[in-house]
Amino acid sequence: MIYKRRKRRFFIPAHPRRLRTITILPSLITLINGICGFAAIGLGAHGSDKFALAGYMIFFAMIADMLDGRIARMSQTTSSFGGQLDSLCDMLSFGAAPAALTFRVLMQNFPHLFGEGTFFFSDFFHRFIWLAGAVYLCCALVRLARFNVENVEDESAHLVFYGLPSPAAAGVLAGMIVLIEHMKKDPATQTALFLFLLKTLLYALPFVAIGTGALMVSRIEYPHLANQYLRGKKPIIHLVWIAVIVALIWQTGIQMALVVCFGGYALTGLSRRIWNRLHTIHPAAVGVSQNASESAAVDAP
């Protein structure tokens, strides 16, 4: 009797249902990003007691935004549909939600800033609040549209951003809002110094919204920290930042740490650009100086 030897299958094909689940998972995480942005808008419209929770929802949207692309690349299910869906959810979570929440926080605290009376400066600041929210929203739209057009499949291109990323800009505003609400409710902060700091943060919030919007549409380079760490590029300055974050959370709480981390990241690219401009000699100036030195050498006896 002859027995036929069965061939072993070393590569078992994935079940269609399991493969479909893996494909859908990144899109579901992307939708969670959009749901968090919608929840932030709804909580901000609910009242001042929900402002801090609305700010945290923006940070939850950031976590989902970091996970969806990573899972899609690990499962090899990246697609143009996923990229467009991610961009639309980013617009909701990091564009519309921070702008609406900033407007609501400032309008809610408007009597605290100027009192019940109306005068020229208060009326001007009231209109300036509208302008700041609109500028931030428009800059986020331009930033995401430009990213969709310029985004390429080259892996080396994902190590830097050109312009402040919209999640980082939203983190600056959401961190300030979370800190403001924490200072308003914490009894330990009800001193003259902290009340002055609270009013300063409220006055600065619309200017920060316009500033982060301008950084989003700029061409300033910002490092893609997650990709640089995952690919083994770990500059020592990043380790210093991690130590600073841990120390801030330990000493001052997570609210202050969020403001320092996202604000520091936003200022890092700008300060590097200013430093390079101040310490880089223009090639034309170098040529003029060389020509002048050569002519002086020729004229010398």
Image (cartoon, rainbow, N blue to C red):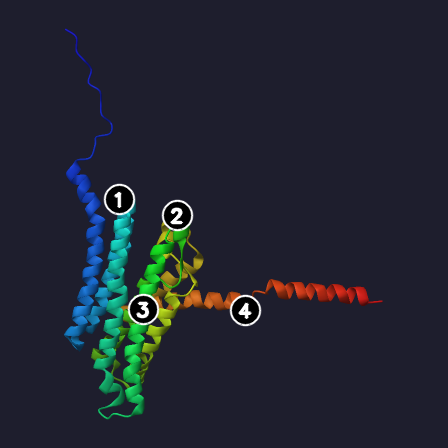
Left or right, 62 with reference to 4: right
- Identified by mark 4, the residue type is Leu
Towards the viewer: 34 or 263: 34
Measured in 3D between alpha carbons, the distance from the residue under mark 2 to the one under mark 3, in whole angstroms, is: 29 Å
**Element type at mark 2:** helix
Mark 2–mark 1 distance (CA, rounded to whole Å): 16 Å
Q: Helix, strand or loop at disc 1?
A: loop
User: Which quadrant of the view contains residue 48?
Assistant: bottom left
Q: Secondary structure at mark 4?
A: helix
The image shows residue 210 at horizontal and vertical percentages of 35, 74
Residue that carries the numbered disc 1 in the rendered image: 77
Q: Nearer the viewer, mark 4 or mark 1?
A: 1
Q: Quadrant of residue 174?
A: bottom left
Decide if residue 167 is on the left or right side of residue 299.
left
- Nearer-the-camera pick, 126 or 66: 126
Question: Residue farthest to the top?
Answer: 1
Which numbered mark, 2 or 3, is in the foreground of this view? 3
Question: Sequence-wise, which precedes: disc 2 or disc 3?
Answer: 3
Q: Mark 4 highlights which residue?
A: 278
Instruction: State the image coordinates of residue 47 (x, y, percent, origin top left).
Output: 16, 76
Question: Residue 155 — which label?
Answer: 2
Q: Earlier in the sequence, mark 3 or mark 1?
A: 1
Quadrant of image for the C terminus: bottom right
State which tag comes first along the sequence, 2 or 1.
1
Separation of residues labelled 4 and 3 (CA atoms): 31 Å
Q: Residue at x 76, y 65 (%)?
A: 295
Residue that badge 3 annotates:
138
Nearer the N terminus, badge 4 or badge 3?
A: 3
